[in-house]
Amino acid sequence: MGKFVISQAKNGVKFNLKAANGEVIASSQVYKDEKYCRKGIASVINNAPVAPIEDQTVEGFTPCKHPNFEVY
């Protein structure tokens, strides 16, 4: 099972989503403080199953106008 890992960043905090094997599969923006970072994690948990995704690993992918997530 994957897990979210919160860490310090230069100007705040960020999170990485790690797969069961420890590989980072998603990284967040830098948040002002941990409270907002945790809200970002909650947003990913709630929105990821239905969010628009731009998968740039597919040959000839079609760019999305406002994707919630980008895979590259």
Image (spheres, rainbow, N blue to C red):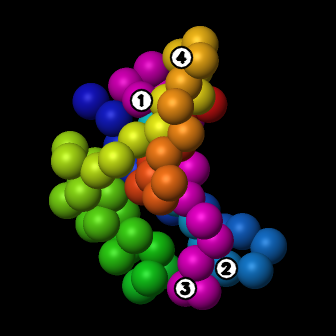
Amino acid type indicated by mark 3: Asp
Pick the residue in front: 68 or 8.
68
Q: Residue at x 20, y 47 (%)?
A: 50
Quadrant in which the C terminus appears: top right
Q: Which residue is mark 2?
A: 12
* SS at badge 4: loop
The image's mark for residue 33 is 3
* SS at badge 1: loop
Q: Are marks 3 and 2 in contact (CB under 8 Å)?
A: yes
Magenta-tinted stretch: 19-33
Q: Quadrant of residue 47?
A: bottom left
Pick the residue in front: 5 or 46.
46
Among numbered discs 3 and 2, the one appearing first in the sequence: 2
Spatial CA span between label 3 and label 4: 35 Å
Spatial CA span between label 3 and label 1: 24 Å
Q: Residue at x 42, y 55 (%)?
A: 68
From the top left corner, tell me how far across and down residue 12 is, in percent. Answer: 67, 79
Q: Which residue is mark 1?
A: 19
Q: Which residue is mark 4?
A: 58
Q: Quadrant of residue 59?
A: top right
